[in-house]
Image: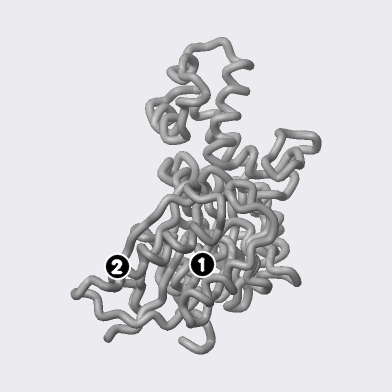
Amino acid sequence: MIKVALGIDIGGTNTVFGCIDPQGNCLMEGSIPTQKHDRIEDYLDELFEAIELGLQNPANDLKIIGIGIGAPNASYYSGTIEKAANLPWKGSIPLAEMVRKRLDVPVVITNDANAAAMGEKVFGAAKGMNNFMVITLGTGLGSGIVVNGELLYGHDGFAGEVGHMIVRKSGRECGCGRKGCLETYVSATGVKRTVYKLLARHLGASELRDIPFSQLTAKMVAEAAGRGDLVANETFSYTAKMLGEVLANVVAVTSPEAIFLFGGLTKAGDILFEPVRETLESQLLDIYKGKISVLPSGIVDNAAVLGAAALVWNSKNNR
């Protein structure tokens, strides 16, 4: 029988899960839709039926020793999901307690970006690092910060929300209810918003001009930038500069060895990474210059599940 950690990543569209051994191998995996059930109890019924079905496979001789969960607005300390805007269950959801009743093993819960950071430390490119941060660049911007080998949680479990640092006073409206948050500029959605702002400013030709907002993707913008489209290139320059400036401020607080960029937006490659590195270095205090690497994530497959499972494998009882 192989000891595994069950990693669960609760996304706004789908929930993915997998059984991960100490070396990071995924020995069983599956997924269910997140939005199907209005009642959390019905959602958990379907989730654990799917998990049980996977465990019943004769080829799987697995023993789950703990469960790690990554979810929006999840608190490590309370084990709850608090007021997650993109999930169907509102208010405060005592998820860790509810899951523990389904399977009597330790349950660790945190937000998805913190899980990504722990995945990087246990299974990815941050092995051996005790001070680093992971910035997740997807629909929004998440961040997980590791200081002295431990995730930074703060007093309530919600520390490290770099995506909700205000970078423009009275700027773009954010889903959190405020204006000018970093993720409204630096994210897949933010890239789209910047494209349309620049298209309104410039009259010149651009292959992005006739694409409806609902059909435009950050990938399309990156590809257009690679072909030399001026609006697309200016969009990535603007986005990367803003990210580099904010990271320089965060460095002054946490002094990381490396900053890992993770998520769909990073597929733009050097179009994003190079101007982020240049801006970061130019904005750093002299005492930090030349010390901080900006790197792509070292996790490629099953990243969300690996990150969630890493919460279990990194716990003091399993080290």
Image point (59%, 36%), residue name? 190
Q: Position of residue 129 (x, y in %)?
A: 51, 74
Query: Residue 309's image quarter?
Result: bottom left
* Position of residue 247 in the picture relative to residue 130 (left or right): right
Circle 1 is placed at which residue position? 69
Residue type, label 1: Ile
Residue 153 position (above or below residue 138):
below
**Circle 2 Cα neighbour tier, 10 Å, few/some/many (<14 / 14–19 / ≥20):** some
* Position of residue 52 in the picture relative to residue 138 (left or right): left
Which comes sooner in the sequence, label 2 or label 1?
Answer: 2
Of tags 2 and 1, the one toward the viewer is 2
Image point (66%, 52%), residue name? 90
| Any part of residue 292 in sight | no
Q: Position of residue 102 (x, y in %)?
A: 48, 74
- Spatial CA span between label 2 and label 1: 18 Å
Circle 2 is placed at which residue position? 54
* Position of residue 257 in the picture relative to residue 287 (left or right): left
Front residue of 267/179: it is 179
| Any part of residue 227 in sight | yes
Marker disc for residue 287: none
Q: Position of residue 248 (x, y in %)?
A: 67, 54
Image point (72%, 70%), residue name? 154
Badge 2 marks a residue whose secondary structure is: helix
Residue 203 position (above or below residue 185):
above
Front residue of 100/121: it is 100
Q: Position of residue 306 (x, y in %)?
A: 41, 67
